[in-house]
Image (cartoon, rainbow, N blue to C red):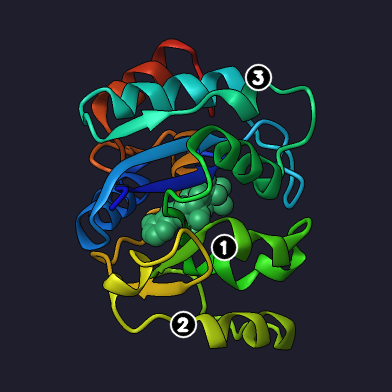
Amino acid sequence: MLASIGIFGGTFDPIHYGHLRLAEEAREALSLEQIVLIPSGQPPHRDAPQTPANHRLAMAQLAATANRSITVDPAEVESATPSYSVLTLERLRRQLGPARPLVLLLGADAFAGLASWYRWRELFALAHIAVANRPGHPPQTPSAALAAEAEPRLAARVEDLFGAPAGRVLPFEMTPLAISASLIRARLAAGQSVRYLLPDSVLDYIRSHRLYT
Ligand code: ATP
């Protein structure tokens, strides 16, 4: 059986312990061989990130160096075209072959907005989707279109994800961490401490490049 790979995209502006615990706990809970962090270049779903993509990529790389199970894919940052998850997953499918289970990792807030993503229905043919609880964001009822697509795909057990390369949806519980990049940016802009919300190496990078001031 081919080992599963977790795909974890985000703006990572900056990367923080909420992201890293999600990656670590997903790896453990879902028996993933590897997690690929994919910082977005020009995200189409939200306001342009405050920080240039090269800095967001560098911070993700610093955060990942301490964990051999996490790698960083720079392709979206290096691409001149907007970052669409469906295109990224199509590329990874071409690279990794049709049989490898891929698991798209999302926080509950991101999953709730899935039906606004470009060609979102095609995501289910390309990967499984694992959804982590996310405190600090009001629970959102999924749209009728998303519920209709996702509910028949709900997996009861992790093992349901091993039998197929894509197509199931699995909620999973992680240590609740109400950390967000916006909270970190706001604290930095106000001159407040963000220590222990993100790795020291990332904080050192933020300070030396005078980001978020
Ligand atoms: P911002 O505050 O700028 O919106 P963010 O902290 O939500 O940023 P993103 O890079 O937008 O970070 O998130 C990438 C992914 O990580 C999304 O799927 C999001 O739901 C998830 N995520 C981020 N922080 C957490 C957290 N503390 N717990 C669970 N999931 C999280």
The circle drawn on residue 78 is: 3
Q: Residue at x 22, y 29 (%)?
A: 68
Whether residue 181 is visible, yes or no, is no
Q: Amino acid at mark 2?
A: Leu
Q: Is residue 60 left or right of residue 77?
A: left
Q: Is mark 1 within 8 Å of ligand 1?
A: yes
Counting the numbered discs, the total is 3
Q: Amino acid at mark 1?
A: Ala
Secondary structure beneath dot 2 equals loop
User: Is the residue 45 above or below the residue 113 in the image?
Assistant: above
Label 2, label 1: how far apart the Cα atoms are: 17 Å
Q: Which residue is mark 2?
A: 154
Query: Residue 130: x percent and y percent?
Result: 42, 65
Q: Pointer 1: what residue?
A: 110
Q: Give the structural element (helix, strand or loop) at label 3.
A: helix
Sequence order check: which comes first, mark 2 or mark 1?
1
The mark that comes first in sequence, 3 or 2, is 3
